[in-house]
Image (cartoon, grey):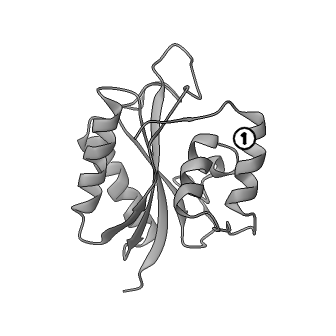
Amino acid sequence: MKVVTAYLALGSNLNHPLQQLHIAREKLAALSAITLIARSPCYQNPPMGPQDQDDFVNQVLMIHTALEVKELLHQLQAIELAMGRERIIHWGPRIIDIDLMLYDKLTFQDDELTLPHPGIYDRLFWLQPLADIAPDLCLPNGQRVADLLERSRSMHPTLTAIA
């Protein structure tokens, strides 16, 4: 089986978010086809959607996996479901969110998945932690994470590293 590098974005703003990220990492590590390679610091940031909710805590993970892209996506969704994720309000509060940001250099789009994840280009709460663990990473379109981070910093408030 071919092993690829993928990047995951974890986020939570319910029920002790740092603990929820820890649980998600443990569940990911328990999957035999996934190896955790690196994890960023955790950052606290205001919600992207409705503002009448608690701040989010976000983190990015670098993994190696032998899972095909859709298999990986379904494993991530199964972890979210097992942890009690409910999809009620778009960009609303959540116990856990595990987004597949990048899967090797794959560009892909269907009804279920878009890669790279469209949010990777401008979400400071993803770009900063991604740059923390992969500062020289280039996206499939040739854009450098460091350049996207610089642009995003000029448009967004700063993040607070918390762990």
Q: In which quarter of the image is residue 134?
A: bottom right
Report whether 97 appears left or right of 33: right
Badge count: 1
Residue 49 at x, y = what percent?
A: 58, 25
**Would you place residue 131 above or below residue 83 in this image?**
below
Mark 1, Cα crowd under 10 Å, few <14 / some 14-19 / many 20+, is: some
In which quadrant is the C terminus drawn?
A: top left
Residue 82 at x, y = what percent?
A: 24, 43
Q: In which quarter of the image is residue 21?
A: top left
> Which residue is at 29% across, 26% downward?
15
Compare residues 19 and 2 and report the one nearer the observer: 19
Q: Quadrant of residue 137?
A: bottom right
View extreme (bottom): residue = 1
Report whether 114 appears left or right of 156: left
> Which residue is at 56% across, 17% downward?
51
> Which residue is at 59% across, 29% downward?
48
Pointer 1 residue: 153
**Would you place residue 34 above or below residue 122 in this image?**
below
**Would you place residue 36 above or below residue 122 in this image?**
below
View extreme (top): residue = 52
In which quadrant is the N terminus drawn?
A: bottom left
> Which residue is at 52% across, 13% downward?
52
Secondary element at image label 1: helix
**Would you place residue 121 above or below residue 38 in this image?**
above
Question: What's under tag 1, amino acid-wise?
Answer: Arg
Residue 28 at x, y = what percent?
A: 29, 58
Residue 87 at x, y = what percent?
A: 41, 32
Compare residues 110 and 117 and report the one nearer the observer: 117
